[in-house]
Image (cartoon, helix red, strand yellow):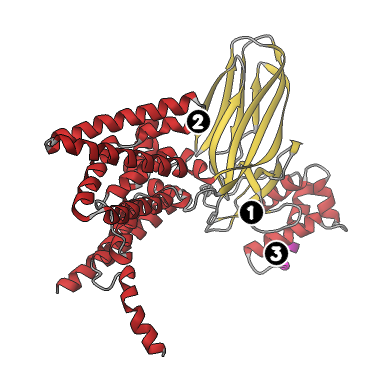
Amino acid sequence: MPRILFYSVIAALFLVGIGLMWGRHAKTHIPLLPGEQAEVWLVEAKINFTALGDAVRVSLDIPDNLPGFKMFNEQTASPGYGFSVDDVGGGNRRAVWTIRHATGAQTLYYKVQVTPEAYSAMNWVSPPRAPLEVFWDESQQGAARHVLEQAHARSDSLLTMCRELIKLVNAVDRDQNVSLLLSSMAVDVLLEKLFNYAGIPTRIAKGLHLEENRHNLKLDPVLVVYDGAQWVMFDPLTGRQGLPDNFMLWNQDDSSLLDVSGGEGSRVSFAITHQTVSAKQLAIDALPQTPFSFFDMHKLPVEEQNMLKVMLLIPLGALVVVFVNIIVGVRTSGTFMPILIALSFLQTALAPGVISFIAIVSFGLLLRSYLSHFNLLLVARISTIVILVLMVIVFTSLFGYRVGFNTGMTVTFFPVIIIAWTIERMSILWEDEGPREVVLQGGGSLLVAVCAYLMMSWPVAVHLSFNYPEINLIILALIMTMGNYTGYKWTELRRFRALRLKLRL
């Protein structure tokens, strides 16, 4: 039963850790690997008009719900104007600029950044209670009926009828009835009227085909048809069903695109550019409210974030220490002192840190051997070593600064107390078991510290430990699993070398 309970706890830690990591990734979209890039489109609406010298109010329909895209940033450039975003109901948003007095040519900008994402069925607008009422004159009504009868005869369902009707209207050799109807209206307007006249709720939506480095663009119309269960989009020129590739809906309802009061000659044009940004920063900037938000460390002050980044690396160092100690069998001076030395290396960089550590500990051992002649008590002896080591570190830092060796200043990050205690332990070990044991345990501690440093400075480990703290449950499961190991250590296998040679012979 104890073994079953132990392995059940290990399995539970693994599953909970992996499940929480995947859940956080699915909710926040923070990448699992550092350095991932995300595709971003910057769409800019430029409004030009001439102010008449009085109060001006400009209202622009702006995106609200974007099938196939996720909006994460919007901004405006409008010097001297007041700006607000009004929700006019039904999910429709409008950008509103106001000013008390303006004269002459005016230019306003609205920018939005979007990133592609998967989308489901187009449920972004509610179905109308009934198709819009359509009025024709006598000749148009007959032509409309004839065109609808043709499309109905060539189809077997509502959606195929829509496609056939679009083909009839866009045919090269158009029917006389179609030509009559097109003589007074555009293709998309005609199709909207025909669909509604046939009892099919339809509206015209407008959007942009996202292509890199485009400017002076106008919105392209698309037909949005309600088939009784969901909204279906059709290209009014080709009859293609579904949302076109890289097509961003901008104006999704029957409201006007631009309204200007107090001005004349208004027009709006669009420009598009493609960008690549950090996927992690993009996810952080657009973090939604999720169950993980309570434990979100990205909202903490920067100073506290930096402190937590270092603290969350300690379990990785502990994992290395446990592996090297239990599985490999490397002896160290103290169990977790290599972790503290590795944390020092994170501040000093590896090469300067190793050199400084060896130099300071060696010098400290010399001082300790000299102090042994004074027969000081333990507390006084360690305190003396702390002061002497501190003086050595300060001198080393000042000397490095004077000679232009900047990394000399980072030596001050070494934990003085830990080094002093290390010197004391090694000096006692020297007296009890000789210099060979000091070299073995001191070298082992340094080797484990370097391994822990390499793990704790690995970009993937740093990224996961801070952005996915649930990984500590997996680390805990690994440590507990290794803690239950009772087999031979790797360094002990050399004892069987003679037996292996005999078996070969």
Asked if 265 appears above or below 427 in the picture, the reply is above
Residue range in magenta is 148-154
Q: What residue lies at 42% left-to-right and 25% top-to-bottom?
A: 398
Magenta stretch secondary structure, dominant: helix
Instruction: Specify few, some or many for label 2: CA neighbours under 10 Å numbering under 14, 14-19, or 20 or more.
Output: few
In the picture as drawn, the residue positioned furthest to the right comes out as: 173
Task: Give the quadrant of the C terminus.
Answer: bottom left
> Quarter of the image holding residue 254?
top right
Residue 191 at x, y = what percent? 71, 50
**Mark 3 lies on residue:** 152
Tell whether 170 sits left or right of 503.
Answer: right
**Mark 2 lies on residue:** 405
**Mark 1 lies on residue:** 243
* Amino acid type of the residue that numbered disc 2 sits on in the rendered structure: Phe
> Quarter of the image holding residue 422?
top left
Residue 245 at x, y = what percent? 67, 53
Asked if 80 appears above or below 266 in the picture, the reply is above
Mark 1 or 2, closer to the camera: 2
Number of callouts:
3
Query: Of marks 1 and 2, which one's residue comes earlier in the chain?
Result: 1
